[in-house]
Amino acid sequence: MVSQVRITDGPKVQIQQVGYTYDAKSVLRDVTLDVPPNSVTVFLGPAGSGKSTLLRLINRLNDLVDGTQLTGRILLDGEDIYAPGVDIASLRRRVGMVFALPLPLPGTVRENITYGPRLAGERSHAVLEGTVERSLGQAALWDEVKDRLDAPATSLSGGQQQRLCIARSLALEPEVLLLDEPTSGLDPISTAKVEESLFVLKSQYTIVIVPHSIQQAARVADQAAFFLMGELIEYRPGDQLFTAPRDRRTEDYITGRFG
Amino acid sequence: MLLSIAALVVVVPILVVIATIVVRGLAAISWEFLFGMPRDGMKAGGIFPAIVGTILLVLGTAVAAIPIGVGGAIYLSEYARDNAFTRSIRLAIVNLAGIPSVVYGLFGLGMFVLFLRFGTSILAGALTLAIMTLPIVISTSEEALLSVPTEFRTVSASLGGTRWQGISRIVLPQALPGIITGVILGLLRAAGETAPILFTVAAFYLPRLPRSVFDQTMALPYHLYVISTQVPGMPLSIQYGTALVLLVLVLSLNLTATLIRSYYRRRRQW
């Protein structure tokens, strides 16, 4: 496994003076931050703070939305992902996404995992089988579903479905994994399992997560960014931001005075 | 109470019509009636050419209407942006659905029979029926595509899928039952229409099977019209028998559509 650890100098993702409008309404204003590799970065903030939007900008999922405008730059390994000529499909293979609700595709557990690799052109049965076992294992789901790989994905419990969605993203061996409130629909035990898998995964992947709660943010964050109404208020190592916030608004939020 | 009376008013006439046709038509049904050629100026013999003609017309309509209709629906639901152009397309489809069928017949006569010189032929008739069927196929297919959750498209994109890969691998298979239902309902209408085939394909009396797509053919709805109004001294049993065959053909298509819909609705996972 050690060979898979990517040793990278400098930030994995760089967000530089990013502004974003939707239907002429400002969603993000002048956001600049660096996401270091092989760690968990948390985007924190109340609803409407722009945190999920920023997450979706990192793998260009907002391209699917009409009427938006982006300023500034987002770099992956130093390269502008919005530059003309960038292959969006291969960008999304490098930057995976897990959504708030478990969204298994129609079909079996196995088909969900192999969907991405097949689109990428993988045809070898042996390789695909290996991918199924590896990615389900990484998402801490293999032991529970190894005898049910041909069952409909929807027959799994909600927590299993969400870990299946994580495994589905991992099947593509992404470099960055984005998670948008991945445990919002899950019970505490399933939530704990998802968080545990994050601790294992961060040795190999760069993880950016919009957490489901401030408590979860504090549990998983290596570094945390606090957003408010489209602006980045504070961005520091997790233990510092949660124990000694510098900005009054950050303190108000994490102590539960609003949000 | 009033509502149940209203429901009865709707149901009773349908049952009376079907029962009458079945009871009086069954007497005429025989091997010769179904698979024989008409004789004696249609007063005896069978209606085989009309049955074959209607089946050929329905098949031809399907071949022409399905690719165009489903393709158009995919464009409208998956690719088209909401602008003046697509709004005018939608307006055209809605209006197309409201045009009387005899107008389609006249259009087919002008466009396919005369201008494109297909003559009075199966090709001209099937194309005319296809144009009449398109609004149904497009609107039901579009509805079926739109009912597939948007999230599937987003998930597919997030896994490195192009828009077309998401459509062809996820959206289309999920929408297929709805599309098939819509197509069958459209073909159903095509099978039973008289006016569009009147000027474009239907033969008054042609006691043989068509030889090519440029040949005329008899067809059940038109044949029924002819033997009911144009031939004096026509035995009633043949009229009822022809009506029964048309009814069975149309109802069995309808039943197929219903079965497909209910089968897939039970299997659907979302």
Image (cartoon, rainbow, N blue to C red):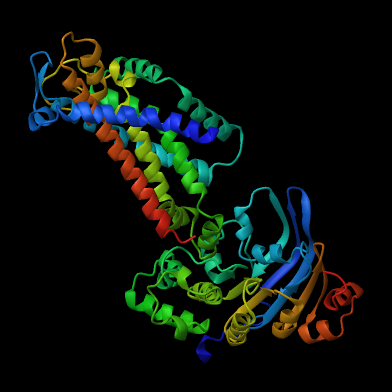
Q: In the figure, B219 relative to B185: above or below?
A: above
Q: Is residue A22 visible?
A: yes
Residue at point 32%, 42% (across, down): B255
Q: Is residue B38 left or right of residue A119?
A: left
Task: State the count of labels.
Answer: 0
The extreme right residue here reads A248
Which corner quadrant of the image does residue B188 belong to? Answer: top left
Q: In the figure, B261 relative to A41: above or below?
A: above
Q: Is residue B24 left or right of residue A211?
A: left
- Please state the horizontal and vertical placement of residue A11, each as a whole percent of the image: 68, 77
Which corner quadrant of the image does residue B106 belong to? Answer: top left
In-front residue for pair B139/B181:
B181
Q: In the figure, A206 relative to B179: above or below?
A: below
The extreme front residue here reads B1
Residue at point 33%, 28% (across, down): B16
In-front residue for pair A74/A164:
A164
Q: State the quadrant of the C terminus of chain A.
A: bottom right
In-front residue for pair A151/B6:
B6
- Please state the horizontal and vertical placement of residue A251, each as a whole percent of the image: 88, 77
Q: Is residue B213 visible?
A: no
- Please state the horizontal and vertical placement of residue A166, each as a whole percent of the image: 54, 75
